[in-house]
Image: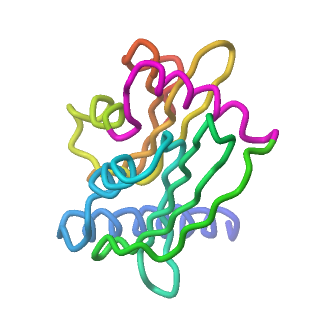
Amino acid sequence: MRLWLLGFMLVSGIASAAQSMYSMFAAGDYVQPLSVMQQIEKGFSGVIAEFEMETQEGELVYQFELINPLANSITRFEYRARDGKLLKQKASKVSADDLAEVEAARLIAAKNQTFSGIIAKAIKERKAFLTEAKLDHDLGISYLEIKLLDDTGKFKLAFDVDNLRPLPLLQWD
């Protein structure tokens, strides 16, 4: 009985956190992640390979990774969500762990696409807020894994960056 009650409280807490985050996003008191992505894409060479958000010291922060395959580098950025102000920027070399993202970034660059443009296509029909996005390349497919939040909770989807279409076999709850 105690485990059931604990499980219920945990699920209720997660659902409540998702609803609270949804309410915050719906209020519009922050800069849209796609706007910050477009700013990065205009100002820097390379392809954004990852976006996520987290709370730091009570403030929502956007984190991005930009891969420049020609320079073999990754630049990490942190922006304050409230006003889009750049907080941190750090560059490093691509490591072996980044090779799948580099492969997908090369494909996007070769097709003259942008990370923000692909996300916009992937979520255009959805009334949801972007919470995470990450490029990946597996089994010969380059895709974008996207995490969204709507009024019913969080969900994931995958989007083929080569053919610009959803990958229904890679949908999650």
Q: Which residues are magenta?
A: 96-116
Residue plotted at (57% across, 27% down): 104
The secondary structure making up most of the magenta span is helix
Name the residue at the front extreme: 71
Name the residue at the right extreme: 96
Q: Tell me, yes or no, whether the highlighted magenta stretch contains residue 13.
A: no
Q: Residue 95 appears in which quarter of the rendering?
A: top right
Q: Is residue 152 above or below residue 108?
A: below
Residue plotted at (70% across, 65% down): 3
| Relative horizontal placement of residue 34, taking residue 138 as reference (left or right) | left
Give x and y (percent) for residue 135. 55, 35
Give x and y (percent) for residue 162. 46, 15
- Disc tally is 0
Q: Is residue 74 above or below residue 108?
A: below
Viewer-proximal residue, 10 or 49?
A: 49
Q: Tell me, yes or no, whether the highlighted magenta stretch contains residue 100.
A: yes
Residue plotted at (45% across, 71% down): 61
| Relative horizontal placement of residue 148, taking residue 142 as reference (left or right) | left
| Relative horizontal placement of residue 44, taking residue 137 as reference (left or right) | left
Give x and y (percent) for residue 17. 42, 69
Q: Is residue 109 above or below residue 33?
A: above
Q: Is residue 26 above or below residue 140?
A: below
Give x and y (percent) for residue 40. 39, 54
Quadrant into which the N terminus falls: bottom right
Residue plotted at (21% across, 43% down): 127
Viewer-proximal residue, 141 or 156?
A: 141
